[in-house]
């Protein structure tokens, strides 16, 4: 998989003092996740969502007709599909 990144150099007196490479995949996953939540909200399925500060991850409360529907919605979340272990 090709992952876009951003290289950041800190130059001082013509010399590289530090270098960082920021991979854009986590940022893209967060944006896709936010769009997914907005779509659920627009469709009346999202009750609330947010991070859990005491642990890595978050909580999403959905309004669905069944547990199977809720699981299907969770499986469609880009953070779940992208296997981002922070959530």
Image: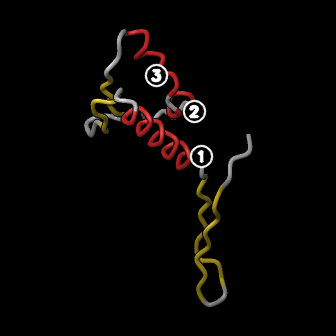
In the displayed structure image, the side of residue 3 where residue 49 appears, left or right = left
Pointers 2 and 3 in contact (C-beta within 8 Å) = no
Distance, label 1 to label 3, CA atoms, is 22 Å
Q: Position of residue 69 (x, y in %)?
A: 43, 13
In the image, what residue occupies the spot 50% across and 46% down?
Answer: 31
In the rendered image of this protein, does residue 39 appear above or below residue 9? above
In the image, what residue occupies the spot 64% across and 78% down?
Answer: 16
Q: How many marks?
A: 3
In the displayed structure image, the side of residue 31 where residue 65 appears, left or right = left
Distance, label 2 to label 3, CA atoms, is 14 Å
> Which residue position is annotated with label 1?
25
In the rendered image of this protein, does residue 14 appear above or below residue 82? below
> Which residue position is annotated with label 3?
73
Q: Position of residue 23 (x, y in %)?
A: 61, 52
* Picture disc at residue 82: 2
Distance, label 2 to label 1, CA atoms, is 9 Å
Camera-side mark, 2 or 3: 3
Q: Earlier in the sequence, mark 1 or mark 3?
A: 1
In the image, what residue occupies the spot 59% across and 63% down?
Answer: 20
Pointers 2 and 1 in contact (C-beta within 8 Å) = yes
What residue occupies the far right of the structure in this picture? 2
What residue occupies the far bottom of the structure in this picture? 13
């Amino acid at each position: 998989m090709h992952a876009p990144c951003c290289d950041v150099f800190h130059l001082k007196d013509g010399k590289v003092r530090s270098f960082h490479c920021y991979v854009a995949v986590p940022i893209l996953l967060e944006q896709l996740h936010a769009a997914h939540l907005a779509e659920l909200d627009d469709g009346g399925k999202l009750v609330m969502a947010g991070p859990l500060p005491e642990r890595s991850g978050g909580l999403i409360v959905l309004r669905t007709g069944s547990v199977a529907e809720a699981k299907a919605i969770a499986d469609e979340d880009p953070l779940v599909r992208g296997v981002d272990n922070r959530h």
